[in-house]
Image (cartoon, grey):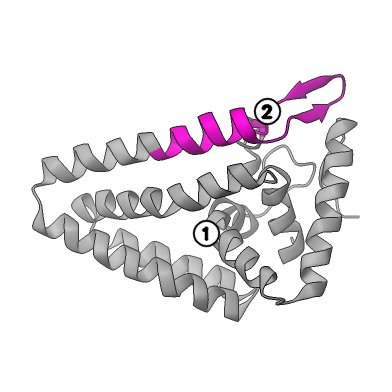
């Protein structure tokens, strides 16, 4: 999948500005608490995930990857430091609490309450079909996806947030326009209950 397709698939289900703001506010807490939990049980997990994500996104956009690392890596280091200095029970309970609150706000409020309803044939449904149909790992999108492409979509939220900030600054206008076009196409396919991504011939 191209970078435009990856960004557009995520953006198709994250169009409402209120939903985006909720995601932007909760994502650092979800990531940070995840890093703290990982550091408690598998200290090497955070650096490994960051390194693999950086390598994956570097293929698509070096500047976007550099800016992503500029805020995610300090977050990971701070979370790992917190996990080292606090009792494991406190980190686990606090981390799970932050995860539950973050996901509830993002999914239960952001998507269910604010995200524009999607037309799926004769039905109007929440944009949570992105999770319900496992599109977040490129299932049920109409095209067989390899492990690399599926991993990129699974990890794309912070990268998408970073790229949108760059788009607002005028970065890569052709890619920005391509994403907008693909989002419109995705919405059209959803309204007709067609696969989002046509199989490659």
The C terminus - image quarter: bottom right
Can you tell which quarter of the image residue 74 is in? bottom left
User: Is 78 placed above or below 195 here?
Assistant: below
x%, y% of residue 128? 63, 32
Q: What residue lies at 56% left-to-right and 50% top-to-bottom?
A: 154
Q: Residues within 10 Å of mark 2 (few under 14, many from 20)?
A: some
Secondary structure state at the residue bearing disc 2: loop
Q: Which residue is mark 1?
A: 158
Magenta stretch: includes residue 117 = yes
Q: Is residue 46 visible?
A: yes
N-term mark: 1 or 2: 2
| Residue 122 place in picture, x, y as percent | 87, 19
Q: Name which residue lies at 67% across and 31% down.
A: 129
What label sits on residue 126 in the rendered view? 2
Front position in the image: 4 or 149: 4
Badge 1: residue crowd in 10 Å (few <14, some 14–19, many ≥20): some
Within the image, what quadrant is residue 149 found in?
bottom right
Between marks 1 and 2, how big is the CA–CA gap? 22 Å
Q: Is residue 201 left or right of residue 145?
A: right
Residue at the front extreme of this rendering = 18
As drawn, the label of residue 131 is: none
Work out whether 146 lies above or below 138: below
Image point (51%, 75%), residue name: 67
Counting the numbered discs, the total is 2
Seen from the viewer's position, the closer of residues 46 and 100 is 100
Judged left or right of residue 109, residue 172 is right
Quarter containing the N terminus: bottom right
Q: Residue furthest top?
A: 122
Q: Using the image as rendered, state which of residue 31 and residue 105 is in the foreground.
A: 105
Residue range of the region highlighted in magenta in the rendering: 102-129
In the displayed structure image, the side of residue 150 where residue 3 appears, left or right? right
Q: Is 112 one of the magenta-colored residues? A: yes
């Amino acid at each position: 999948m191209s970078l435009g397709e990856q960004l557009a698939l995520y953006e198709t289900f994250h169009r409402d500005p209120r939903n985006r703001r909720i995601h932007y506010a909760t994502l650092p807490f979800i990531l940070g608490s995840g890093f703290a939990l990982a550091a408690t049980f598998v200290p090497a997990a955070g650096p490994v995930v960051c390194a693999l994500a950086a390598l994956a996104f570097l293929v698509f956009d070096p500047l976007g990857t550099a800016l992503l690392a500029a805020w995610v890596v300090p977050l990971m280091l701070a979370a790992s430091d917190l996990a080292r200095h606090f009792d494991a029970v406190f980190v686990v309970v606090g981390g799970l609490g932050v995860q539950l609150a973050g996901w509830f706000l993002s999914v239960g409020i952001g998507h269910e309450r604010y995200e524009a309803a999607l037309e799926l044939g004769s039905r109007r449904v929440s944009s949570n079909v992105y999770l319900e149909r496992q599109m977040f790992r490129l299932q049920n999108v109409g095209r067989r996806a390899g492990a690399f492409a599926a991993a990129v979509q699974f990890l794309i939220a912070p990268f998408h947030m970073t790229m949108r900030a760059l788009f607002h600054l005028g970065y890569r206008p052709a890619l920005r326009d391509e994403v907008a076009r693909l989002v419109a196409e995705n919405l059209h396919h959803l309204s007709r209950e067609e696969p989002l991504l046509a199989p490659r011939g």
